[in-house]
């Protein structure tokens, strides 16, 4: 796999994992890896992402496989603000009235805000 493509895939995998609050250890276990380093190499761009793992991760993250392997990083829950270079995104959040859902969405928004502050998205 081309180095630049591996780098984009690595970035996409990391962003999806971080946005959902998963650890590398959790993802490695989910994929059936013996330890987290096998998954860590995907996020470092040191190993080629296996199609079987891409499909499992796409299912976990509820995205198309194409979104994980795209050269243009994106996260499906983001909708870019029409004001270009504004440094902001618009996000649609579903609430059902439960405090667990509210707390989960607040944590997700905090992680997204941290990534924005670091200019990683």
Image (cartoon, rainbow, N blue to C red):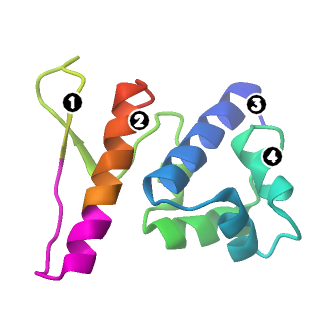
- Residue lying at 76% horizontally and 28% vertically, measured from the top left: 3
In this view, 18 is above or below 26? above
Look at the picture and state if 117 lies above or below 111.
Answer: above
Q: Which residue is mark 3?
A: 2
Q: Which mark is residue 41?
A: 4
Image depth: mark 2 or mark 4 in front: 2
Q: Residue furthest top?
A: 85
Marks 2,4: beta carbons within 8 A:
no
Pointer 2 residue: 115
Magenta part of the chain = 91-105
Which of the two discs, 4 and 3, sits closer to the camera? 4
Q: Residue at x 13, y 81 (%)?
A: 96
Please name which of the two marks, 2 or 1, marks the residue nearer to the observer. Answer: 2
**4 or 3: tag closer to the N-terminus:** 3
Q: Which percent across, then down, holds residue 89?
A: 21, 37
Would you say residue 94 sits in the magenta stretch?
A: yes
Magenta-span inclusion, residue 29: no
């Amino acid at each position: 796999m081309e180095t630049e493509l591996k780098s984009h895939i690595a970035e996409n995998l990391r962003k999806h994992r971080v946005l959902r609050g998963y650890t590398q250890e959790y993802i490695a276990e989910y994929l059936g890896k013996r330890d987290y380093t096998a998954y860590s190499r995907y996020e470092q761009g040191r190993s080629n992402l296996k199609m079987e793992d891409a499909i499992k991760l796409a299912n976990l993250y509820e995205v198309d496989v194409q979104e994980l392997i795209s050269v243009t990083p994106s996260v499906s829950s983001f909708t870019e603000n029409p004001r270009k270079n504004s440094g902001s995104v618009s996000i649609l959040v579903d609430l059902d009235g439960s405090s667990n859902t509210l707390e989960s969405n607040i944590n997700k928004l905090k992680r997204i805000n941290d990534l924005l502050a670091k200019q990683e998205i």
